[in-house]
Image (cartoon, helix red, strand yellow):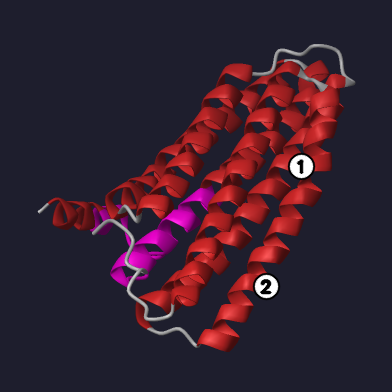
């Protein structure tokens, strides 16, 4: 099921409030996407100036979270939404929290980039950092797109894809441990890269949470503890 379900109210003002709340979430998502892109550039190029800019931008994301939380609270208090409208408000509120936490992870990764910029070049595995960074950034983009379009199929694909990120993360961590064992001079740099990898893996988790909210919003189903095979069955149902 796709498309906007929240257009049929007698009150035009209520429609406008719901639309504005959802739009503000997507705007916050766009800012977080931009922040992730800058963070990855800072990490891969050890650019302390760009990393500092990412850290400074976190205040704007926090402010947007507070604004959207206020909108959700006001709608709950004054409109007492039911059915799909209530699910929309709850999904926006929870997704806003996940976006704010992605912003926090981007800030933490940027701090690791600054620390790496202060070290001599190491033999760390930037290829795997770049790969996972691209992967979780695409998951975030797809999760937000699925929210914008209420696209259950794309949301399910994001949730299923989280397993691939976990596999890539485990492989990258093993490679970094090997580098530390081969040469003790790599330890400082590799440890910072490990913290950055951990942050990227968490970004994938938060993108997955957002996609799960889309499924809840459209289908009224809580899929947080479903196994991949069960989610694949949902994909098959959605295609039929």
Instruction: Give the x, y percent position of residue 203.
Output: 58, 45
Specify the segment rendered in magenta.
205-231
Instruction: Give the x, y percent position of residue 158.
Output: 39, 46
State if disc 1 and disc 2 touch (CB < 8 Å). no
Location of mark 1 (residue): 108
Q: Quadrant of residue 109?
A: top right
Location of mark 2 (residue): 70
Q: Please identify the dominant SS of the magenta region.
A: helix
- The question of residue 229 being in magenta is answered with yes
Q: Quadrant of residue 100?
A: bottom right
* Above or below for 28 versus 187: below
> Considering only order in the chain, which callout, 1 or 2, is on the residue closer to the N terminus?
2
* Above or below for 149 versus 111: below
**Can you say which quadrant of the picture contains the C terminus?**
bottom left
Residue 195 can be seen, yes or no: yes
- The question of residue 175 being in magenta is answered with no
Residue toward you, 23 or 238: 23
């Amino acid at each position: 099921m796709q498309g906007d379900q929240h257009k049929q109210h007698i009150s035009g003002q209520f429609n406008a409030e719901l639309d504005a709340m959802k739009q503000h979430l997507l705007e916050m998502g766009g800012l977080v996407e931009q922040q992730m892109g800058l963070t990855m550039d800072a990490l891969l190029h050890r650019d302390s100036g760009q990393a500092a800019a990412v850290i400074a931008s976190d205040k704007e994301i926090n402010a947007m979270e507070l604004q959207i939380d206020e909108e959700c609270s006001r709608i709950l208090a004054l409109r007492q939404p039911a059915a799909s409208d209530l699910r929309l408000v709850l999904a926006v509120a929870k997704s806003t929290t996940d976006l704010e936490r992605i912003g926090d992870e981007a800030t933490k990764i940027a701090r690791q980039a600054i620390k790496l910029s202060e070290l001599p070049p190491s033999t760390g595995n930037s290829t795997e950092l770049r790969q996972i960074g691209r992967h979780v950034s695409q998951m975030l983009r797809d999760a937000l797109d699925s929210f914008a379009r209420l696209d259950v199929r794309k949301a399910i694909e994001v949730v299923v894809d989280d397993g691939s990120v976990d596999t890539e993360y485990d492989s990258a961590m093993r490679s970094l441990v090997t580098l530390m064992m081969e040469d003790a001079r790599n330890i400082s740099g590799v440890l910072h890269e490990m913290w950055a990898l951990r942050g990227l893996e968490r970004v994938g988790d938060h993108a997955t949470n957002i996609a799960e909210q889309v499924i809840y919003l459209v289908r009224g189903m809580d899929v947080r503890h479903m196994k991949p095979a069960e989610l694949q069955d949902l994909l098959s149902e959605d295609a039929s």
